[in-house]
Amino acid sequence: MKLSQAQKALEFLKSNPNQKFTARFIADKLIATYPQDYIEKRNNIKFENNESAFKQ
């Protein structure tokens, strides 16, 4: 079963209790941990670059 983005974030936070993270840091970790899940979004032509794809 493929996890939703919210589920991935929750799993990350559960595995790092009592720590604070920025949203950007969590996003970077999710992309690094689940790169296959983000390839389609990264390749979407409406985004100018990777940064704009993941800020959205």
Image: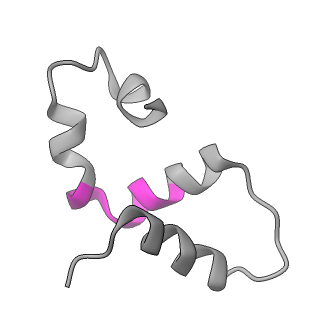
Question: Taken as a whole, is the magenta stretch helix, strand or loop?
Answer: helix
Residue at 64 percent across and 75 percent down: it is 13
- Location of residue 35 (image quadrant): bottom left
In the rendered view, would you say 16 is above or below 8?
below
Which residue is found at the position 52% from the left and 51% from the top?
A: 27
Number of callouts in the render? 0
Q: In this view, does 46 lie above or below 38?
A: above
Q: Residue at x 32, y 20 (%)?
A: 49
Q: In this view, does 27 lie above or below 30?
A: above
**Residue 9: image location, x then y, percent:** 52, 68
- The residue nearer to you, when weighing 56 against 32, is 56
Residue pictured at 75% horizontal, 58% vertical: 21
Residue 35 highlighted magenta (yes or no): yes
Magenta residues, start to end: 29-37
For the C terminus, the image quarter is top left
Q: In which quarter of the image is the N terminus?
A: bottom left
Q: Nearer the viewer, residue 55 or 34?
A: 55
Q: How is the image coloured?
A: one colour
Q: Which residue occupies the foreground of this view, 22 or 33? A: 22
Is 23 on the left-hand or right-hand side of 7?
A: right
Question: In the figure, residue 42 lies in which quadrant?
Answer: top left
Residue 23: x, y in percent? 64, 48
Q: In terms of image quadrants, where is residue 14?
A: bottom right
Q: Give left or right: position of 50 versus 13.
A: left
Q: Position of residue 28 (x, y in %)?
A: 51, 50
Q: Is residue 19 above or below residue 42?
A: below
Residue 26 shown in magenta? no
Q: Is residue 33 left or right of residue 35?
A: right
